[in-house]
Image (cartoon, rainbow, N blue to C red):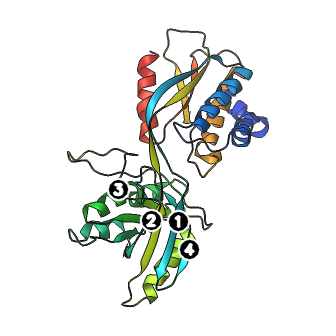
Amino acid sequence: MYKYPAQAQADQALESDEAAWDFVEGVTTEVGPRQAGTEAEARGRDWAVKWLNARGFQNVADEPFMMDTWVPGDTHKAEITSPFPQPFVIQPLGGSASTGPDGIEAEVVMFKTVADLNAAPAGSLEGKIAYISHSMTPTQDGSQYGFAGPARWVGAGIAKNKGAIATVIKSVGTDYHRNPHTGGTTFRNADGSTDVGRVVPTPAGALSLPDAANLERMFERAGDRPITMKLVLTPERLGMTQSGNVVGEIVGANPDLPPVLLACHLDSWWNSPGAFDDGAGCGIAAAAALNVQKHGQPLRTISCAVCRGRGSRIIRQHRVFGSAYR
């Protein structure tokens, strides 16, 4: 049935191994949300060090570094004040500016896509709040994330450049509970470069999908009446705080060979325990290394890197890791 023994071993692990589940269940129960650069993330790194040591990883270490840390603050509110007054559920996007505790109130202008926003005339959003929608659908390969993601990644920066005082987006996701999907936003620097997670000089937030759908229905029936929103978001920057990457190894028989790197990110957003993004990735990486060890010492060292970082940042850290451990 199997051409290679490793195929049978993989199927056996799939049926009976509980290491990955143990990691995810443990970190979400005992640590919970762990935003990068915060005290909660430090507890998460301590937890990961103990977990790796307890399961026989060698050379386990927490390798610290400093980072510029943004936190969401305590107040996240959005409400339509006219013509259909009601509260919405919102979360700030990573890097958002604060509205101040008193908030801001302005007319909302809707854009069905980022392309529509790009086409808006310069200055056309002066004093207004931009709302950016998208038409993301569920897929097996995640391709729609790349399609809909620009609403979050670059929307606030584009809207700001056209005069908007704030931006709200339809959460980039396909579920329909009232739990907004946050994430970092981006604006373009004067030299044309971009920096994910950098402070956007306007407030920016993500509405839950049901609230975004409600807002779009309001636009359909408001006629000539302007839709106004009051927005209160109070994120802040903490300055430089300590983060770190936790590493552990299954030591191979031949130290002259380059290691195999299995990596994930341990941090999560503040409004989620990070079970899927990316606690599961950490559990899978660690379990894969442990399952190799079950069948004898590997030829190459397997390095498990439980990193701070999301998306492109974690890729950059892996390159640094590779250079340091050659």
Tag 2's secondary structure? Answer: loop
The reply to whether discs 1 and 4 touch (Cβ–Cβ < 8 Å) is yes
Residue type for callout 4: Pro
Q: Which residue is mark 4?
A: 87
Residue beneath the point at 25% across and 69% down: 119
Which x, y percent locates residue 315? Answer: 43, 35
Residue type for callout 1: Lys
- Graded by Cα atoms within 10 Å as few (under 14), some (14 to 19) or many (20 or more), the crowding at tag 3 reads some
Which callout, 4 or 2, points at the residue further toward the start of the chain? 4
Residue type for callout 3: Val
Q: Which residue is mark 2?
A: 103
The reply to whether discs 4 and 2 touch (Cβ–Cβ < 8 Å) is no
Mark 4–mark 2 Cα distance, whole angstroms, equals 14 Å
Q: Which residue is mark 3?
A: 154
Mark 1–mark 4 Cα distance, whole angstroms, equals 8 Å
Which callout, 1 or 3, points at the residue further toward the start of the chain? 1
